[in-house]
Amino acid sequence: MEQVVSLISAVQFPDLAAVTSLTIGDKSYTAAAATAMAELLLAKCPNVTHLSLADVIAGRMELEGLEILTTFSATCGASMPSLTHLDLSDNAMGLKGISACSPLFSASRKTLSSLSMCNDGLSHQSMCEVADLLTEAPAIQVSPRSPPLVRTCVPCICVPCTCVPCTTLT
């Protein structure tokens, strides 16, 4: 970790507040490298609107991959309030990866206009989780005599939704 921090610290970055588009994808990172990048680079780019985290966990074991996604997600979610475009493609994340990215989804739900998640191994359930994280659900109060709540999902853009509420609309 110390070697990674010293290498990144040695790079003379321009004014990071001026950066609006950032691609750190297409390269697999270790957990130590992800932590160093998060602290020394990502946290200092508050005006990023376009972010690519595509293919950042290739070849990593599951636990390390989830740690990397969590690190990037928490840092970017906390430091990039104007994020409009996010690319998480090619990460083979599944439902656990969606959970690891939840801080980023939740933080950018009001600003995000484009989300790419191609080749991530996502099921219908995973996409419903993404939809839940990106949409604000109002607080629902249920009385003891209320009928059971039917969960409606937001149809995902890559696969037609087949849940009961959505299929009854067609």
Image (cartoon, rainbow, N blue to C red):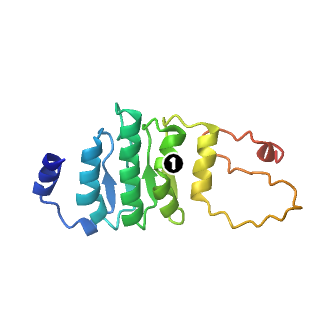
Q: What residue type is labelled 1?
A: Ser
The residue indicated by pointer 1 is 99
Residue at x 53% of width, y 62% of height: 109
Q: Residues within 10 Å of mark 1 (few under 14, many from 20)?
A: some
Residue 154, x across and y down, in percent: 68, 51
Which is nearer the eye, 43 or 32?
A: 32
Q: Is residue 163 left or right of residue 53?
A: right
Q: Name the outermost residue toward the front.
A: 144
Q: Residue drawn 27% across and 65% down?
A: 44
Q: In which quarter of the image is residue 146?
A: bottom right
Secondary structure of the residue carrying numbered label 1: helix
Relative to 28, say whether 107 is above or below. below
Image quarter (top left, top right, bottom left or bottom right) of the C terminus: top right
Judging depth in this view, the residue of 158 and 128 nearest the camera is 128
**Vertical relation: 138 (above or below) 24:** below
- Residue 136: give x, y in percent of width and height: 62, 63
Q: Identify the residue shown where x is 89% and y is 61%.
A: 145
Q: In this view of the protein, can residue 108 be seen by the observer?
A: no
Residue 55 at x, y percent in the picture: 37, 39
Residue 65 can be seen, yes or no: yes
Query: Seen in the image, is 86 located left or right of residue 165?
Result: left
Image coords of residue 50 (percent x, y): 39, 57
Residue drawn at x 19%, y 47% as measured from the top left: 1
